[in-house]
Image (cartoon, rainbow, N blue to C red):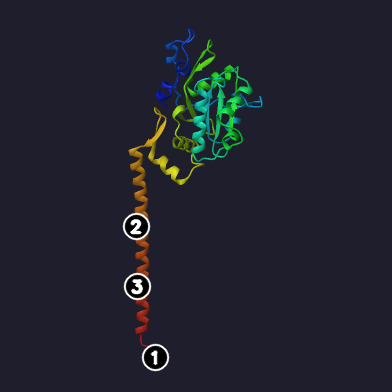
Amino acid sequence: MTRLVAIATLAAVIGAAVPLHAAVTQRDLKEVAAAPPVQATLPLNLPLQGEDDISKPLRFWLGQKPSVWVLADYTCKTLCGPVISIVSDALAQSGLRAGEDFRLIVVGLDPKDTAADAASMKLAQVGRDNENSAASYFLRGDSEAIDALAKALGLSFIYDRNADQFAHPLAAFVIAPDGRLARALPGLAVDPLDLRLAIIDASKGSIGTWADHIRLLCYGYDPVSGTYSVAIGRLLAAWGGTSIAVLTLLIGLLLRREHAARRGRTTFDHLKARSQTPTTE
């Protein structure tokens, strides 16, 4: 995937919200970006702790279904909370079924954050006792696990010790059931339709309606903006394929009708000939 300029532009969370400290410079902030490598795949054996403080490998959290991952600071005072809320709302509006079609997985960037911090963020941004909440997992890891996950996603972030805040890209990553990175979307501008198409695309056709799959044929993903838009080439190809299919069906129906009419005429002529044949008694 190419560099996500739209995401990188929104990356400097602490830079936009609080004054810069000596620990973080403008040069440092230029290094904050989301640049997923080609064919990026998450490390399936990476240990991540759930809300019960029990550590399980990353493959367990995937749950054999597409998932949407967000890396955030659970004690963030700026944009981490709104990003999680925006993604959660987009999932709720996508028309897909939480838990059956997708999971939302948030991973804390700060290894100092506690299970209580994660639970507080989940309650504030996702809510309680709803479908999205039941299918949302707010995980934590040590510094090595977090760095390994960020590296796999091509995500670069900086920690400001003085402010105890992170400068990081605001992104949502759609992950296929096998851990492969399918799509990266801008966290502050996640469109429900784009998210739906990304999840269906990541499922390799196992979820979604017929209309969704037709739409995927006609829409192209723009890795720079992180959105789906109508691609003329795909649209023409899909329209051409549909036209050929319809034309083939029409020709088949016409040939079938002609064959039936010919059989009808043959039967009529045969009966007429029999009726005109003299009989002897």
* Image side of residue 177 versus residue 281, left or right: right
Label 1 environment density (alpha carbons within 10 Å; few <14, some 14–19, many ≥20):
few
Marks 1 & 2, CB-CB < 8 Å contact: no
Q: Earlier in the sequence, mark 3 or mark 2?
A: 2
**Where is residue 154 drawn, in percent x and y?**
47, 22
Inter-mark Cα distance, 3 to 2:
21 Å
The residue at the point 41 percent across, 42 percent down is: 215
Q: What amino acid type is highlighted by mark number 2?
A: Ile
Is 38 located above or below residue 242 in the figure?
above
In this view, the mark in front (1 or 2): 2
Residue 251 badge:
2
Number of marks drawn: 3
Q: Earlier in the sequence, mark 3 or mark 1?
A: 3
Q: Secondary structure at mark 3?
A: helix
Q: What amino acid type is highlighted by mark number 3?
A: Arg
**Where is residue 120 drawn, in percent x and y?**
60, 25
The residue at the point 48 percent across, 9 percent down is: 21
In this view, the mark in front (3 or 1): 3
Label 3 environment density (alpha carbons within 10 Å; few <14, some 14–19, many ≥20):
few
Inter-mark Cα distance, 1 to 2:
48 Å
Whether residue 258 is visible here, answered yes or no, is: yes
Residue with the mark numbered 3: 265
User: Residue 260 appears in which quarter of the rendering?
Assistant: bottom left
Residue with the mark numbered 1: 280
In depth, the one of 211 and 19 nearer the eye is 19
Q: Earlier in the sequence, mark 1 or mark 2?
A: 2
* Image side of residue 201 versus residue 266, left or right: right
Q: What amino acid type is highlighted by mark number 1?
A: Thr
The residue at the point 54 percent across, 39 percent down is: 101
Label 2 environment density (alpha carbons within 10 Å; few <14, some 14–19, many ≥20):
few
The furthest residue to the bottom = 281
